Amino acid sequence: PTVWTEFGKLSQQYEVANLGQGFPDWLPPKFAVDSLVEAALDVHASPHQYTRTAGHPNLVRALAGRYSIHMSREIDAMNEVAVTIGASQALYLSLQTLIKPGDEVVLFEPFFDLYVNQVRLAGGTPVFVPLSFVPYEEDDGTQDVIPGEWVLESSKLDAVISSKTRAIILNSPHNPTGKVFTMSEMKAIAKAVERAGPQCTVLSDEVYKYIVHAPPKEDDSAQRINSIASPGHIHFASLPGMWERTLTISSAGKTFSATGWQVGWCIGPKHLISPIHQLLPYVQFCASTVIQEALARSLPKADQPYEGYDSYYEYLKENYTRKRDLLGNALKSAGFGVPDYEKTPGGGFFIFARIGKSISLALPSSRKNVFNKAAPTGTARQDWALCQWMAEEKGVLCIPSTPFFSESRIAEGASDEFIRIAFCKTDETINKAALALFDILRENEGSTEEDTSPSEIAQNISIQATK
C-alpha cells in the first residue's frame, strides 16, 4: 500500500471534500475537447492508428516551435523532442538512459515521492538535499502557527556534489511545497552541475510552468515574450551552458486540466534525446495518436483570447490564483500556516500548509504514532494521523507530508508539521472543505450555537478571495 492507495480508499469510504490528489475536478477547456472531437472524426488524417514512435509529427513540430521561443534557440523537432505517456514516463525513460548502478541522483527534499523509486529502478542512489523551511518571524511562544517559505541553501547542495553525481532532478514549480525556484537558486544549481563534471545532467520537471501564480520578484529579466511564455517561470535549460546538460520534462495534463490524456515529452540536445528514442519502442510503440493530434490542435488555440483574457494561459493563472486565495484564507482561519504570496513566490496547485498548535491539540492523541503499514516507516506520525482523522471524522481529505521526505528526515520530525492540500478543485469543493476546517476550529475553541456559523464564515472567506 502507498499513500495514494490508502487515501484513495478513504475517499471512497467516506463522504469527503477531496483536496488530495492533484487532478482538477472539472472538464478541460472547450477548445481542447473540441480539438479531441475534431481529431477523432477527421476522416482524412484518421489518427486512430500507430504514429511515429518518438512522437506524432504534428505534435513534435508544434512543441519544437514553442520551445524554440522558450529556449531562445532553434529546436529540431525530429531529433530534440520525444513524446511519452505522461511526464512520469518521460522521467522514467530519462533515468533509464542515464543511470547505471553506483550513480547518484540528487533530489531536493521534500520531493515528489515517485522520484525516489524511479531512481532506484534505474539502479541509482538517491541523495537528498533538504530545502530549509524559514519562518517569517521568530517563535516567541505566543503564536499559534508561523508560516514561512522553503529555500535552497547552496552550501547543502555543494556538500553532496561529487564525481558520482550523474543527475539532479529539479522540479519548479515544486510539488509538494509550491515553491518556485528563484534565478539565484537556479544559478547555484548550474554551478553545482559544472562542478560535478561533464557526466552530470539536470532533469527539469516543469509540468506546472503555466501555473506560476506568484512570480519571483527578483526575476525582472524573465520578461514575457508572448502568451506561450509563463511569466515568472525559468526554463533551466535556457541558462548559459545548460542546454547541453538538461532534459526538460513536461506534459499537457496540468495545463489543460486533462491529466487522463497522458501525453508528456522530453526536450533536449540530440545526445540526450537519442537514447530515449532508441528505448521508446521497447516500452510502448507510441503514445495515443488521437490524443497527440488533439493536443497539437489545442496548442495554437490556447494562445488566442479566452474568457475575457488575452490567452487561455492568462485565464489559467488568474483562476488558480483566485482558488489559491479561497483555500488559503480558509486554512489560515482554521489554524494552519500558509505562505504569504506577497513575499514568497508560488506555483502549481498545492498549498503545503503548516499545522498550527490548535489543530495539533484537536487531533486525538490516540491516533498519533500508531502502526499503519501504508505510512512510510510504518508509523502514522502527526501529519498522517491528522489527514486520516480529517477524512474519517471531518469530511475533508488532504495528503500527509511524510511520503515526500526521506526516512532520516522523517525520524527528525521534519514532516510532522505539514500537510499537502490541492486547490485544483471547484469552488464548491473548496467551500465544502472550508466548512469542515471551520468545524475543527469551532470544536477547538468551544464555540456555541450563537457563534457565526461555518457557512457564514466560508461565505466571508469566499468574498475576500474575489476581491
Image (tube, grey):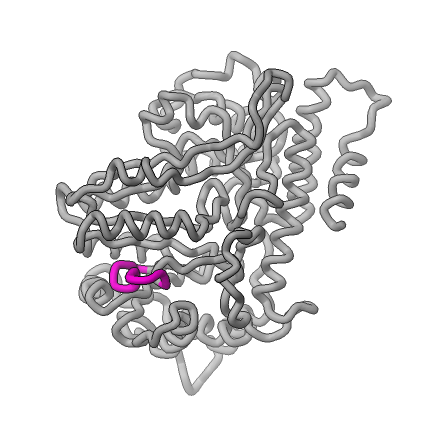
User: What residue range appears in magenta?
Assistant: 238-247
- Whether residue 70 is visible here, answered yes or no, is yes
Residue at horizontal 32 percent and vertical 44 percent from the top: 115
Residue at horizontal 57 percent and vertical 51 percent from the top: 214
User: Could you say which quadrant of the image residue 442 lies in?
Assistant: top right
Tell whether position 370 is magenta. Answer: no
Residue at horizontal 27 percent and vertical 52 percent from the top: 92
The quadrant in which the N terminus is found is top left
- Whether residue 291 is visible here, answered yes or no, is no
Instruction: Using the image, determine if residue 92 lies above or below residue 275.
Output: above
Image coordinates of residue 384 in percent, x first then y, are: 47, 26
Residue at horizontal 50 percent and vertical 72 percent from the top: 298
Image coordinates of residue 45 in percent, x first then y, are: 41, 83
As drawn, the residue found furthest toward the left would be 101
Left or right of 390 on screen, residue 55:
left
Tell whether position 245 is magenta. Answer: yes
Left or right of 103 on screen, residue 337:
right
